[in-house]
Amino acid sequence: MAQAFIADLHLTAERPAAIALFCAFLGSARERLERLYILGDLFEYWVGDDGLAEPECAPVIAALASATRAGLAVSVMHGNRDFLLGSGFARHTGCQLLADPHSLTLYGVPTLLSHGDALCTDDAEYQRLRARFRDPAWQRQVLSRPLPERLEMARSLRRESERAMSGKDEALLDVNDDAVTALLAEHQAVQLIHGHTHKPGRYPVALDGQRATRVVVGDWYTTSSVLTAGPRGLRLTAVADFPGAVADVMGR
């Protein structure tokens, strides 16, 4: 059976169609895949595992738990929006939380998985924010606040992020080529799969004379892409082309 990679779903109650699509995708995936990797930003924001009871989370948590109980292995990586996903989320869903980056051999190819935001090194302002958000002391301080306060904080940060991105040069929002080659060389990999940039496609990487590839999985705002991996290689498609009931949801 194949494996698949998705990223940047940004699920939120404000986009119920995306939640319905994801639940339908899981229902189809558990019959056709042995493992699913979610490479960050499954949720638009996550303010702590005590938010599992929030109504907008319920269908996503239930669908993940159902899929893992049915035998689908699901691995979830933190993104820049849901970096507070913790052991409670893993326990309730049956998902495995992955470190970033994560190394594996994918059908014989040394491969690295990443959300991708750590590679956007040209954006110094963002990297400072990222370091702050990933700091355990900062996270403990935030998680000590009441849930409603954290929810409002997340919404405020999202608004600030949207304003900041609208004024930035497009090049700052993409990965840095040198950061990519350095990461691949450090981990002795020739293939990198990531999300975050919302620029799906395959990109060649110059790696000390070797042929290397960077594959970007697209977001779920428009194309809703999925990368499927099997013995014959990688296939990047729209979720609508994934077999099963997904196409029915896309057509609604």
Image (cartoon, rainbow, N blue to C red):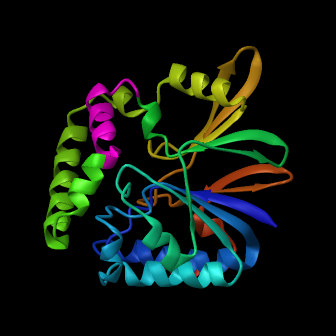
- Tell me if residue 4 is in the magenta stretch: no
Which image quadrant for residue 53? bottom left
Please state the extent of the stretch shown in magenta in the rendering. Answer: 121-136
x, y percent for residue 130:
33, 40
Task: Give the vertical position of 132 relative to 65 (above or below).
Answer: above
User: In the figure, 195 relative to 220: above or below?
Assistant: above
Q: Main secondary structure of the magenta part?
A: helix
123 part of magenta stretch: yes
Q: Residue 105's spot in the image, x, y percent?
A: 78, 45
Q: Would residue 238 be seen by someone viewing this image from the given angle?
A: yes
Query: In this view of the protein, which residue sits in the foreground, 166 or 77?
Result: 77
Residue 157: percent from left, percent from top: 19, 52
- Nearer the observer, 66 or 241: 66
**Residue at 29% of width from left, 53% of height from top?**
139
Residue 7 vertical position relative to residue 23 in the rendered view, above or below: above
Image side of residue 43 versus residue 226, left or right: left
Identify whether 44 is placed above or below 161: below
**Is 91 left, or right, of 189 in this rendering?**
left
Q: Position of residue 242 (x, y in %)?
A: 66, 68
Residue pictured at 68% horizontal, 77% vertical: 30
- Is the N terminus in the top left, top right, bottom left or bottom right quadrant? bottom right
Observer-nearest of 137 and 194 = 137
Describe residue 110's horizontal placement relative to residue 53 as left or right.
Answer: right
